[in-house]
Image (tube, grey):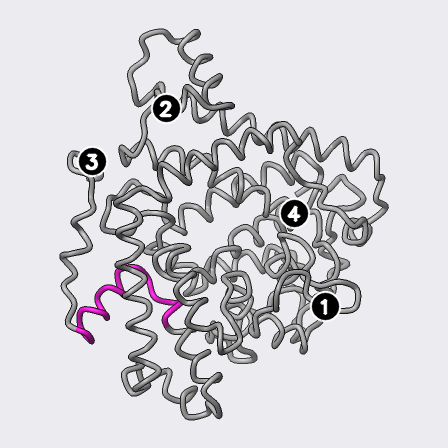
């Protein structure tokens, strides 16, 4: 790997790990982080955690795993073009969704409401908790013992979380984040590295792109709708001019890959211009410039807002999606309430944690950890097993005729 930018993260200058380890002879610290994330249990479970649709609705929809892989690919591309550390950008990208609950943001909203009296819940803070405490495979420590730079990127890839005096910038910070930060200061008042900012914008690029794909496949809107929108409209027009009469699926793919390219090229151009003007001398200088440098241009950001509003109306709040949101919210709420009332329903390997819980808040955190770690499928199975629900009802929102089989 070639790093050309003076402000790229240098693995040889890493701030290290909470528990010191011998440096690998053939992998950099950031490569080692990436590999530990890929081999974690939480990463494997992303296969059966979904974005907008639940698992029963078809094989072709994105899951958290496919999304994370796509984000990592975009992050490597952006980092490489900007002369940054591609390994660190990839590690943060692969870890960014580890803390998500079953059923996407719907599950997170439900669990956040349930945990509001007990220290809150946030998927970024939960990802940090997973890689620092809940993964329990190593003999010398809990968690994955990742480098400071990777942990910083997981915690604050979307920007600073506090001001210089430690006052939260938005509401209160989740207890999971505060607990770890008290042991290992992640400098929550600064921006993260350029690599973390790359991972954050790569997330935006990936979901803007694949939500259009998934929405088309679901039948919630069609190509004619996208012809009326900025970015997507010109992309379809360009394909039609170059490949008249192209079949529907190829036309769709060609147009949306152009949308993808527009976003990537825009981010690179903006970042190159802003970084050239600022001339940061090293990686730490990026953290103290006071702004997010890796971002869309103002023009493209405005156009993407139009697309996101379209998706909000036609996809995220579509009748069948809203109906499913209500159903799965009940699943999360029912399971959380059941385990809080009788922790004996938790698996044996969680019993020691329950015994050590010295307050209702501590018990709630254990229950939240367990529920948040569930896949869509397992949550539905446990709800049926423990509460007698009918799993068949979760299939009734599938669009008839959808090409979801393999």
Q: Earlier in the sequence, mark 2 or mark 4?
A: 4
The kind of secondary structure element at disc 1 is loop
Q: Earlier in the sequence, mark 2 or mark 3?
A: 2
In the rendered image of this protein, does residue 148 appear above or below residue 277? below
**Reading the chain from its start, which is encountered first: label 1 or label 3?**
1
Q: Which residue is mark 3?
A: 402
Does the magenta segment cover residue 172?
no
Q: Quadrant of the N terminus?
A: top right
Cβ atoms at labels 1 and 4 below 8 Å apart: no
First along the sequence among labels 4 and 3:
4
Which label sits on residue 345? none
Q: Nearer the viewer, mark 1 or mark 4?
A: 1
Q: Which residue is mark 4?
A: 197
Residue labelled with disc 1: 167
Q: CA distance from mark 1 to mark 4?
A: 22 Å
Whichever of labels 1 and 4 marks the residue nearer the N terminus, that label is 1
Residue 225 marker: 2
**Quick check: 152 left or right of 121?**
right
Q: Which residues are magenta?
A: 371-387
């Amino acid at each position: 790997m070639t790093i050309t930018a003076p402000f790229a993260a240098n693995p040889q200058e890493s701030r290290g790990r909470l528990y010191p380890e011998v440096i690998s002879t053939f992998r950099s610290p950031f490569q080692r982080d990436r590999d530990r994330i890929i081999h974690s249990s939480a990463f494997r479970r992303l296969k059966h955690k979904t974005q907008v649709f639940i698992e029963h609705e078809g094989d072709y929809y994105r899951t958290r795993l496919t999304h994370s892989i796509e984000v990592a690919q975009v992050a490597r591309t952006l980092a490489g073009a900007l002369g940054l550390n591609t390994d660190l950008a990839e590690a943060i990208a692969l870890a960014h969704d580890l803390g998500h609950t079953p059923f996407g943001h719907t599950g997170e909203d439900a669990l956040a409401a349930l945990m509001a009296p007990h220290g809150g819940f946030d998927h970024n803070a939960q990802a940090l908790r997973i890689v620092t405490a809940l993964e329990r495979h190593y003999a010398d420590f809990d968690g994955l013992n990742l480098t400071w730079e990777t942990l910083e990127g997981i915690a604050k890839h979307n920007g600073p979380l506090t001001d210089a005096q430690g006052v939260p910038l938005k509401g209160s910070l989740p207890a999971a984040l505060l607990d770890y930060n008290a042991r290992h200061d992640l400098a929550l008042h600064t921006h993260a590295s350029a690599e973390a900012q790359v991972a954050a914008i790569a997330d935006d690029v990936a979901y803007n792109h694949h939500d259009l794909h998934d929405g088309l496949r679901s039948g919630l809107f069609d190509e004619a709708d996208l012809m009326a929108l900025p970015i997507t409209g010109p992309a379809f027009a360009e394909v039609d001019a170059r490949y008249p009469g192209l079949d529907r699926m190829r036309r769709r793919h060609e147009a949306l890959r152009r949308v993808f390219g527009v976003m990537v090229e825009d981010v690179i151009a903006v970042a190159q211009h802003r970084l050239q003007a600022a001339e940061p001398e090293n990686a730490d200088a990026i953290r103290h410039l006071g702004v997010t440098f890796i971002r869309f241009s103002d023009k493209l950001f405005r156009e993407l807002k139009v697309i996101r509003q379209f998706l909000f109306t036609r996809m995220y709040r579509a009748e069948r999606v809203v109906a499913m949101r209500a159903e799965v919210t009940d699943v999360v709420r029912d399971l959380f309430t059941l385990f809080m009332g009788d922790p004996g329903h938790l698996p044996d390997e969680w019993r020691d944690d329950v015994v050590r819980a010295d307050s209702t808040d501590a018990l709630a955190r254990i229950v939240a950890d367990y529920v948040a770690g569930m896949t869509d499928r397992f949550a539905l199975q446990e709800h049926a097993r423990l509460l007698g629900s009918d799993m068949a009802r979760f299939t009734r929102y599938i669009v008839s005729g959808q090409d979801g089989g393999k």
